[in-house]
Image (tube, grey):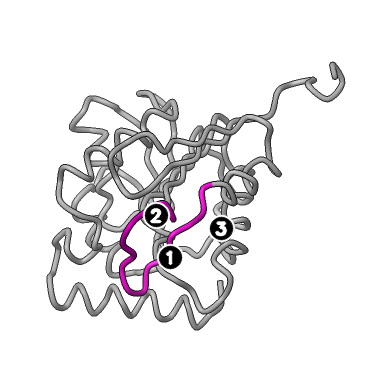
């Protein structure tokens, strides 16, 4: 990510925190009903109790809270580039791990069953959004033993918010297919977004072919 974009994103959420405090409006992620649907789709990638989960752009750690409330006992690590958000997340969920990190720079030196990210790629960057997402998908895939689940705003909408970036699902699917043959594109739920799942490639597939 261009350092200018990184600084802009950190400053954006600091300003929203100053205005709204610990509130969903700070993250601009919508009402609880949307969280529930979005988190359900992420979980349906295959996350079950006992698994380890890395949440990129974790914000307040809301996905972890949702998982626990719905009976999924996971080993959760949340990372975010905004230190203030991470501090609040630690206070919300002292039983989980939270880290201030930029995964394009910082190496966690850990592997996880699933790597997820929700609403972390919604802003239009000064740099190339698709190049950034391609890099983040690759980094997530390398850290995941069971799968990756990322969601994005869709280009298949009749309205686009100012400053938002709406991705063409076909392009994100193509980026994912560069990494593994096992890709699922979810555009079947009633939000203006979609989700991609990436799973480890078929063992021996190339040889068998």
Which residue does the numbered mark 3 point to in the structure image? 133
The answer to whether marks 2 and 1 mark residues whose Cβ atoms lie closer than 8 Å is yes
Which residue extends farthest top? 208
Tell which circle, 2 or 1, labels the residue nearer the N-terminal end. Answer: 2
Residue 202 lies, in percent from the top left, at 70, 23
Q: Quadrant of the C terminus?
A: top right
Element carrying mark 3: helix
Gap in Å between the C-alphas at discs 2 and 1? 7 Å
How much space separates mark 1 and mark 3, taking CA atoms? 12 Å
> Dividing the picture into quarters, in which one does residue 7 lie?
bottom left
Q: Secondary structure at mark 2?
A: strand
Secondary structure mainly formed by the magenta segment: loop
Which residue corresponds to mark 1? 165
Report the mark closest to the observer, 3 or 2.
2
Q: Give the side of residue 25 with respect to residue 51, left or right.
A: left
Disc 2: which residue: 153
Image side of residue 110 versus residue 54, left or right: right
All told, the count of numbered labels is: 3
Q: Secondary structure at mark 1?
A: loop
- What range is drawn magenta here? 155-169
Task: Answer with mark 3 or mark 2, whichever residue precedes in sequence.
Answer: 3
Q: Position of residue 88 (x, y in %)?
A: 22, 61
On-image quarter of the N terminus: bottom right
Task: State the separation of the CA atoms marked 3 and 2.
Answer: 13 Å
Which class describes the residues within 10 Å of circle 2: few (<14), some (14-19), or many (20+)?
A: many
The one nearer the camera, 75 or 3, is 3
Going by the image, does 94 lie left or right of 49? left
- Residue plotted at (26% across, 76% down): 14
Identity of the residue furthest to the front in this view: 158
> Is residue 22 magenta-colored?
no
- Residue 20, image x and y in percent? 12, 71
Mark 3, Cα crowd under 10 Å, few <14 / some 14-19 / many 20+, is some
């Amino acid at each position: 990510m261009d350092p200018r974009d990184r600084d802009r994103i950190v400053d954006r959420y600091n300003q929203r925190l100053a205005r709204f405090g610990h509130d969903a409006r700070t993250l601009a992620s919508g009402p609880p009903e949307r969280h529930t649907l979005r988190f359900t789709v992420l979980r349906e990638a295959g996350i079950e109790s006992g698994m380890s989960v890395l949440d990129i752009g974790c914000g307040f750690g809301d996905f972890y809270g949702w998982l626990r409330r719905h009976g999924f006992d996971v080993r959760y690590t949340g990372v975010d580039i905004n230190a203030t958000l991470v501090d609040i997340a630690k206070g919300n969920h002292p039983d989980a791990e939270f880290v201030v990190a930029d995964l394009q720079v910082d190496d966690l030196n850990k592997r996880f069953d699933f790597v997820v990210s929700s609403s972390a790629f919604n802003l239009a960057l000064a740099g190339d959004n698709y190049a950034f997402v391609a890099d983040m998908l690759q980094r997530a895939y390398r850290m995941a033993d069971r799968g990756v689940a990322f969601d994005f705003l869709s280009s298949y909408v009749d309205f686009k918010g100012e400053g938002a970036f709406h991705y063409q699902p076909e392009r994100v699917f193509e980026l994912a297919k560069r990494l593994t043959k096992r890709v699922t594109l979810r555009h079947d739920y009633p939000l203006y977004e979609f989700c991609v799942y990436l799973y480890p490639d078929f063992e021996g597939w190339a040889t068998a072919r």
